[in-house]
Structure formats: C-alpha cells, structure tokens
Image (cartoon, helix red, strand yellow):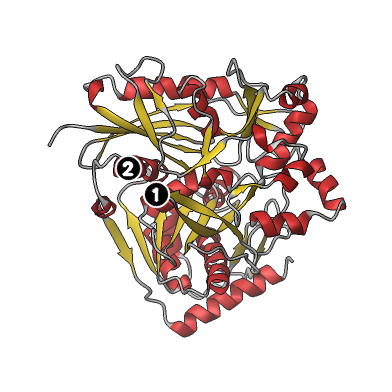
Amino acid sequence: MEKKYIISIDQSTQGTKALLFDESGSLIRRTDKAHEQMINEKGWVSHNPAEIYENVVEVVRKLTEDIDRTQVAGIGISNQRETSLAWDRKTGEAASNAIVWQCARAAGICERIEKLGEAEKIRRKTGMNLSPYFPASKIAWILENVEGAKEKADRGELCHGTVDSWLVFRLTKGRSYKTDYSNASRTQLFNIFELKWDEEICRMFGIDPANMAEVCDSDSNFGETDIEGVLPHPVPIHGVLGDSHGSLFGQGCLKEGMTKATFGTGSSIMMNIGEKPVLSTHGVVTSLAWSMNGKVNYVLEGNLNYTGAVITWLKDDLKLISSPGETEGLAREALKDDALYLIPAFSGLGAPYWDSHASAAIIGMTRTTGKAEVVRAGVECIAYQITDILKAMSEDAGVKVEELRVDGGPTRNAYLMQFQSDIAETVVQVPDSEELSGIGPAYASGLKLGIWDESIFEKLNRRKYTPKMDGERREEKYAGWKAAVGRIL
C-alpha cells in the first residue's frame, strides 16, 4: 500500500493540536501548542486570532518534521465551537480579538432582542434558546463595538464567523470562505430546517447574511493549502467539524440513537437523531451533527459546565486530593450506605434544568460523612448529571440509550465509568484514544479521499462497562439525586 498521511488540526479553547494518521488510520504522532487566555477586569474572555493561526502552522511544521511531506494527502479541522471573530476580506487581518464561547459580554444584545418578543421564534428556527453563548450576539457585539467593523460590513469588506472559517480562509490565502453545517448550526443564525442562513434572524442581530461564510458539507473540499509552505504542494482540506461533532463522528455514532459523552472540564452529550430534526421539550438543544455526501444528520445535545471541573475543585479548592487519580480509590473506600449528594451548581444549573440562580450544595451529610464520602459524591455527580441529559434526550427522541460512547480524561476512572453504566442503565464504551475531536475530521477527510472505508470506525479498541447495580438500588439512588437537586431549584 502506498504510504499516505492525513493531518488533523484540532484547534481547541486552550490550544492547538496537530495529529498525524497513516494510511491504516493509526494515530502515529501529536504536537501541541497553547495560546494565551485573555481575561480582563470585566470577565471578558478573548483569544488572539493571529496567534491561533501562527500556532496552527507551527504545530503542523513540528508534526511533519521527520516524514516525507509529499505523502500528505489531506487535512481535517476541528475547532472550538461558538468562539467568534471578524476579519478583513481583502487582507485577512482580524478586526479584533476573538470572543471566546465562555464570554457573556453580548448578554445585553440578547436581552434587547428578548424584549422584542423574538426569543421563541429564534428557538423554533435554530433549535437553541437565545443566549450570548452563541455567535449571533457575539458577531453583533463586534459590529456594534469594534471601530470601523460596521462600515466595512456594510461595504461587504468584512468576513465574520467561527474559528473553522477563519482557519480555512487563512490556510487557503483567502480563496475559500466556507464553514460546515455543524458549525453553522451553532451560530444561532442558521435555520436548521431550511438549511440556510436565516435572513430574518440575521436582521435581528444587525448581520448581513451575505457576509457569512458559504455553508458546505462537512466532508466537502474546503480548498487547498500548503500551510504557509510547510508542505511542498497544496493538499485539500476535506473534513471540517465542530469539536463535539468531530467526537461524535470519530466515535462512529453514525446511526439514529447512537450517543456519546465527552468528559472534560465540562461535558457535551450528543445523540444522533437521524435525518429529521426534533425540537426538544425537555431542556436540551437541537443542532446539526454534520452533512456528509449531501446527507444531513441532526443531534440533540446537552452541555454541562461542571463535570471534570468538580474534580479540579476537590483538588485545588478543598485540598481533599492531590491528583485526580486519587478519586477512584477514595470512592471505593466510602461508606456504601452513605447517601451524600454534591450538586455542582457553582454558576447555576444548565441542561436540563436551566436555573441560573441555583447555588451549589452538599446534601445528606451525617456524622459519618468524611473525606472519602465527599470525594465519592463529587465523582458520582458527574454521572448523575449526564444521566439527567440522557433521560431528557430519550424522552425527546423516543429512543432508549442502549450504549454510551465516552471520551476524555475522567474516563480513566473505572469507578466513575461503572457508576455511569449503573445509574444510566446502559452499556458504557471507553475507547483507547482520547483524541476523538481530532479523529473525527481525520476520518471524514480520509473517507472522502478514499484512503480508507467505514471499517476505520472499528480501529478504536474499547473497554466495555455493563450495568451491575440492582434495579431497586438504582432507582433509590437516582430518586435521591433528583430530590437533592429539587432542594436548590
């Protein structure tokens, strides 16, 4: 077999990774570089787009130092979702720093639109509740507050969107201004039923849809690049996906009802619901998974702010552990019948409760409650929160979650994985790789280029956890969780 490589660029919130895959689909190398997290006195969170682009070039250069670069056949890109920016269509220079997905500086714009009574219309067209989390208000903020941005936009001289479209534009030297369906569906400007930029919603935010990127299949040709001369010849960018969508695809969740959960600082839980959208009535959102070969798939998604971050809190703030690895042993040491629940509502509760005023709490302490019990409650609250979302998705889609495919650092905790299987009453599958958000676009690119076929999804080795908890015990513990949450709502 002729040697061929696929490069995947995983541009995330904290930094940029470059991954190298060989012709068999094996991940053979990875390089990383962090970028600055800019947080001002108002709590605004920003990234420098020029730094991000320079880091992309640098990690690919290092990744390919010891290979024959003529054998690179294609590139995939996954990106931090919702982070938004604008740039000059002629020069490619960013108009300002990017507004990171965590940043709520555009809340006033959302409040203004909500007072006009448009929030429900936006939800029914985009699948998402009106929020400064999404790019619509972030782009509007740039147009309203960055000097000269509105004037350039009015003249058609400004591009604006998500990080994927910025990277595609820069990598192709301005020849390609494109985004994919997964990223477009997260902007709150895209009609997920009509599959186009919604002119009415764009007008609400003061945005001209003509200035938005062309929306393409996630596995289409986004243009060619030599990555600033790193490669000896241009190669096609053939896979672009938002990071959570990349993880869903990399996990092989290609059929209706297949579900994944990413265990990170927070968590993204996604269910593939097939070719027909379902608007949630149970507190999760509807988006596009991707479009491949002209065929669209939809997802239900729930996002949690505090999952792995709970373990960090136990370590850095409470000083109960010195490393995350200690949590498994302590969870097993805890008294079996201790009914302690930790509700990590440090910044309110998100999906499926949506109570921004809720406060964190530890409920059910007794005289026998000690360090091990508190740590176990911290571990278990991750599984309880994910189970809440799985149940909401099942209600919306009318599909029982038979199997949950998971990824992320906390999946190394065998106690947590078994408890997740027990409390959600589902099989939990843990792959041997943690790079799922980057694997997804790499697979999409290699499939489109004919380097491999769908048997590539069998490449990942998986550890399986099956439910072992007695049904009555499961119901008792989950009912206790719901009662504890109910006390802070």
| Residue nearest the viewer, comparing 94 with 383 | 94
* Residue wearing tag 2: 448
| Residue nearest the viewer, comparing 17 with 309 | 17
Label 2 SS: helix
Image quadrant of residue 160? top right
Position of 269 with respect to 62 (left or right) is: right
Image quadrant of residue 365? bottom right
What is the quadrant of the N terminus in the image? top left
Q: In the image, residue 420 lies at what x, y percent?
A: 45, 66
Q: Residues within 10 Å of mark 1 (few under 14, many from 20)?
A: few
Which residue is found at the position 25% from the left and 32% from the top? Answer: 5
| Residue nearest the viewer, comparing 178 with 2 | 178
Position of 199 with respect to 193 (left or right) is: right
Q: In the image, residue 86 lies at what x, y percent?
A: 65, 27
Which residue is found at the position 46% from the left and 52% from the top? Answer: 262
Label 1 SS: loop
C-alpha separation, residue under disc 1 versus residue under disc 2:
9 Å
Amino acid carrying label 1: it is Asn
Q: In the image, residue 442 lies at what x, y percent?
A: 35, 40
Of pointers 1 and 2, the one earlier in the residue sequence: 1
Residue 293: numbered disc: 1
Q: Can residue 324 be seen from the camera position used here?
A: no
- Vertical position of residue 394 compared to residue 36: above or below: below
Q: Residue furthest bottom?
A: 472
Q: Can residue 69 be seen from the camera position used here?
A: yes
Amino acid carrying label 2: it is Lys
